[in-house]
Image (cartoon, coloured by chain):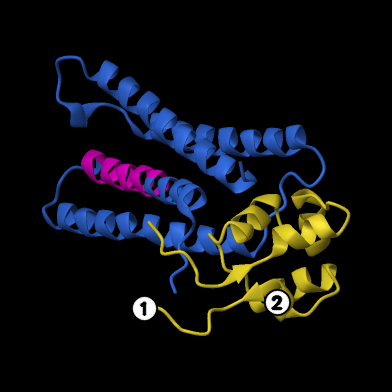
Chain colours: A blue, B yellow
């Protein structure tokens, strides 16, 4: 398996894992009261920070475990990465539009912050999925 | 998912003709990953012109001796 494909798997697992932990934590705090009243900011920031650290640690561990040259990348990896990132960013554009509408509708900050967070997670998952499919099915080249 | 390239190659045959060079050894000499060499050999990836020249140089042959393109073009749509 290509190193970049492994990284894509790690990103997908970390993104889904971190978001799941966040959602479970918030829902467990809500109890009977309204969800938007739950203190979310600290948990959200810690989850994002933890996910970033986990991804970096996993990346370093894979590079060390793979031995010399394991993390080598080439032009094919860069091409796949660029197209996959672009695919993932389409979700961010949709998320930004949704947030714009939510802000105009003057929804509570809780919903706006969580919509942005969800957009980032979905973007990361879609980008990772596109990358994995590209490595497995033959990339994005067209002739 | 992806239409295979019409560019074919004889990298596999050239590797065997060069002391049964492994894909990893060729990848090291070209400066790419082994997965990219595998993808090129299987026709799943069409390398850039520069990478194609680097591959040909490893085998000390011309580009045409490594990569071929059919005389009659198929459906390019």
A52 vs A83, nearest the viewer = A83
Which label sits in the foreground, 2 or 1? 1
Question: Quadrant where the C terminus of chain A lies?
Answer: bottom left
Residue A74 is at least partly visible in this image? yes
- Residue A92 location (% of width, % of height): 33, 56
Q: Residue at x 30, y 60 (%)?
A: A93
- Would you say B70 lies left or right of B30 here? left
Mark 2 burial class by Cα count in 10 Å: few <14, some 14-19, many 20+: few
Q: Are discs 2 and 1 both within one chain?
A: yes
B37 vs A130, nearest the viewer = B37
Q: Which residues are magenta?
A: A110-125
- Residue B25 location (% of width, % of height): 82, 52
Q: Residue at x 50, y 69 (%)?
A: B5
Mark 1 burial class by Cα count in 10 Å: few <14, some 14-19, many 20+: few
Identify the disc placed on residue B75.
Answer: 1
In the displayed structure, B59 sits above or below A22; it is below
Q: Residue at x 83, y 53 (%)?
A: B21
- Residue A134 location (% of width, % of height): 47, 53
- Would you say A77 lies left or right of A64 here? left
Chain hosting mark 1: B
- Would you say B38 lies left or right of B43 here? right
Task: Tell me if residue A7 is in the magenta stretch.
Answer: no
Task: Tell me if residue A122 is in the magenta stretch.
Answer: yes
- Between the residue at mark 2 and the residue at mark 1, the CA separation in whole angstroms equals 26 Å
In the displayed structure, A57 sits above or below B58; it is above
Q: Which residue is mark 2?
A: B50
């Amino acid at each position: 398996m290509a190193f970049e494909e492994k990284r894509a798997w790690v990103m997908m697992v970390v993104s889904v894992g971190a978001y799941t932990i966040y959602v479970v934590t918030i829902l467990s705090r809500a109890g009977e009261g309204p969800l938007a009243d739950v203190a979310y900011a600290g948990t959200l920031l810690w989850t994002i920070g933890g996910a970033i650290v986990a991804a970096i640690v996993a990346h370093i561990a894979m590079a060390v475990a793979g031995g010399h040259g394991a993390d080598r990348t080439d032009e094919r990896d860069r091409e796949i990465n660029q197209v996959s990132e672009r695919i993932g960013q389409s979700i961010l554009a949709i998320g930004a539009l949704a947030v714009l509408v939510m802000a105009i509708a003057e929804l509570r900050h809780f919903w706006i912050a969580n919509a942005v967070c969800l957009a980032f997670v979905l973007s990361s998952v879609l980008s990772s999925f596109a990358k994995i499919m590209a490595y497995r099915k033959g990339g994005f080249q067209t002739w | 998912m992806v239409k295979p390239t019409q560019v074919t190659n004889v990298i596999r045959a050239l590797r065997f003709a060069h002391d049964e060079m492994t894909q990893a050894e060729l990848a090291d000499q070209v400066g790419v990953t082994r997965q990219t060499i595998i993808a090129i050999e299987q026709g799943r990836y069409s390398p850039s012109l520069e990478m194609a020249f680097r591959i040909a140089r490893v085998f000390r042959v011309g580009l045409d001796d490594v990569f071929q393109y059919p005389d009659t073009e198929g459906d390019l749509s």
